[in-house]
Every structure is written in structure tokens, then in C-alpha cells.
Image (tube, helix red, strand yellow):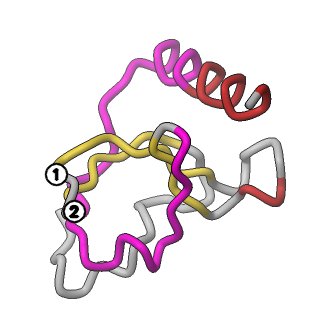
Amino acid sequence: MHDPATWDGYPENPERSAWHWIEDADGLRPLLWRGQDWPDEVDRGEWQDGYAVLSACDLNRGRYHGPVALSPRMAALCRLKMFASYSSG
């Protein structure tokens, strides 16, 4: 776990899109980090919580707890569902 006093708002392995546990004013929750492998280049390097998009600066006072442990199949399914809802809305 990263020290919240020094966390810069970026996850471990920021080049990879993945779910991570973040704790901030809204509580502990999984957020999707859109890394360099995200399909739409303009959306890379941001966090997504449902329909809200957050920058690393928005979360730099939060606490990073690490990646969400998902099987590769579940991670791919979650990513596809999130991307589909983002693309259609």
C-alpha cells in the first residue's frame, strides 16, 4: 500500500488499464485506470468511476490500496462492459 502523504494519484503499472482499490472522500471503492493500452487515446491516463472521469490530481489526497484481484476473464469482461457503456453514452 502506498503512503497517502506521498501518493501521486497514479496506480502501479500506469501503462496498463486495470481496476484498483482507491479510498478517498467517497470511501473505499474500485476505480478503473485507463492506461496506455486503452483503445481511445484521448481517454488514457485517467480514472473512471461509473460515468465520472477523474484525473490523477483529483485523487492525490486519496489512499491507494493496490490492484483489484480479478481473474483475467473477469477483468476483461468488466473492461468490455465499461468501455461499451462509455462508448454508447
Q: Residues within 10 Å of mark 1 (few under 14, many from 20)?
A: few
Q: Residue at x 25, y 43 (%)?
A: 29
Rendered location of residue 15, percent (x, y) = 62, 59
Does 2 lie within the magenta span? no
| 61 to 81, vertically: above or below | below
Q: Residue furthest front?
A: 89
For disc 1, the marked residue is: 27
Task: Assess whether mark 2 and mark 1 are in contact (beta carbons under 8 angstroms).
Answer: yes
Is residue 62 rendered to the left or right of residue 34? left
The magenta stretch spans which residues?
Answer: 51-78
Q: Nearer the viewer, residue 73 or 89?
A: 89
Q: Residue at x 43, y 40 (%)?
A: 19
The kind of secondary structure element at disc 1 is strand
* Quadrant that contains the N terminus: bottom left
Quarter holding residue 30: top left
Does 73 lie within the magenta span? yes
| 27 to 39, vertically: above or below | below
The kind of residue tagged 2 is Asp
For disc 2, the marked residue is: 24
Q: Residue at x 52, y 22 (%)?
A: 78
Is residue 9 rendered to the left or right of residue 26? right
